[in-house]
Amino acid sequence: MGVLMSKKQQVEKVQKCNAVVSAFQAGVKERAPTAKQGDGDVEEDDGPVRTSASPEGKNAEEAEKEDTDSSAAPSTSQQASAATRDECKANNEAWSRLRDGKGVEPEDLDKTHQLTPPAFVRPKREADDDQPVEVELDKKEQPPRDEMCDVCEVWTADDLYPCRVCTRMFHDGCLRELGYLRTEALQEMRDAAHTVTGWSCYYCDNLNLLLTEEEMYSLMETFKQCKIIPESCLVSDELLQYRHFVSKQQFEKDLTDEQEEEVLAQFASLDPEKKGHIEWSDFLYFESLAMLRKFRTENSMMRLLTAKERDKARSLFLGLDLDKDGLITRAECRQAQSSWFHNPNKDSQSCNVSISQVGPMCESSPGSSGSERSKTGDSRPVTWADFLKESAIYILAARPNSSAMHIHLPL
């Protein structure tokens, strides 16, 4: 009776339900003497009791049977819904990894013997972030390398591989166990780590980790509005669609034909191997660099440079300052900036780091002063302080180990 009442409450209003239950109880009392005559009679009477109690009870049983049948054999729509839920779950996990700064999840992270990847903490802008930074020209910093592996904290001499940007050292086996480098990438690391070109660790290789929470939120919102799915490759049409959307969002107008050609040139520079698509990591680094150029001043970007990077910039400047007066020309400044992307170990048409077009800075952006200065004559003198400020964006763009190109080389 309890089952019939609960089904009844789903079909009828409360008042009608009470009336039907009362009628059902009265019918049970009238049939009680007959039910005591024998087991056979009870079985015969059970049928009329359930079927004659009320038509609503029968409807409830039929509805319950339909529910059972539907749960036993999922319909095509239910299967499609389940597939959609799985896809949404995968997308949400990808967004979560993007918020954590991992950018792209390595293919071999499902290994049972892997080490636990480190948790990334995004930087915060300080109150004096945009204030000038004083870096002495005649005083090299020469930071010492770490003596132990950053992962396992064990020293094994020549088996450690240094990062060319920071002071961290790594075992190739530890990097493999973390799942950040596939076999071919590990071999590239072994070949490059002890050369002049060097190799960037997984911290320094990921430019996205330089963005603050607020900057990353702004970038993710743009991705979502344009339906860009994290960890997916982009073909040229998708990049064009994305650029049109950003142009409408920022300037309330579509791209011109000339700007579309520039986007296709960007696509080609991000796809140096001519695969017909650009990898997610390169697209993410490209957009992260664009966010830095949009929201950071030159002083702020200077604060992102490591001691190793400042030392290399110092050596380049001193090598160009032949008369030792602390000044070089604009042409020499551009020559030095181009040298960040020179790789003597590969063909001249390729580079060992990310450098492709981020696009010109708008005049209202904090870093626009650099593009204005670039319009002056090649003979204009450039001081060490100005050289380092103007070169900061190129130095940062040279960090990743990708063969893609993320920023225009100076003309």
Image: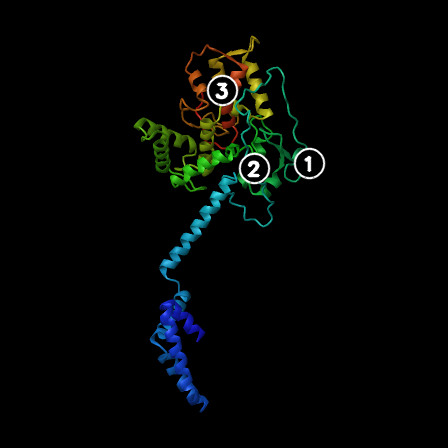
Would you call the spot at circle 3 few (<14 residues within 10 Å), some (14-19), or many (20 or more)? Answer: many
Nearer to the camera, 28 or 242: 28
> Where residue 155 appears, x then y in whole percent?
69, 36
Residue 52 appears anywhere in the view? yes
Q: Residue furthest bottom?
A: 37
In primary-sequence order, the first of circles 1 and 3 is 1
Q: Label 1 belongs to which residue?
A: 156
* Residue under label 3: 390
Asked which secondary structure carries label 2, the reply is loop
Residue 79: which quarter of the image? bottom left
Looking at the image, tell me whether mark 2 or mark 3 is earlier in sequence order. 2
Which residue sits at x=39%, y=69%? 9
Q: CA distance from mark 1 to mark 2?
A: 29 Å
| Amino acid found under the numbered disc labelled 3 | Glu
User: Circle 3 sits in a helix, a strand or a loop, which is it?
Assistant: helix
Q: What is the crowding at mark 2: few (fewer than 14 residues within 10 Å), some, or many (at least 20)?
A: few
Q: Where residue 162 sits: x, y (%)?
A: 61, 31
Q: Position of residue 179 (x, y in %)?
A: 56, 43
- State whether residue 350 appears in this view: no
The residues tagged by marks 2 and 3 sit, at their Cα atoms, a distance apart of 27 Å
Label for residue 121?
A: 2
Tag 2 or tag 1, which sits nearer the N-term?
2
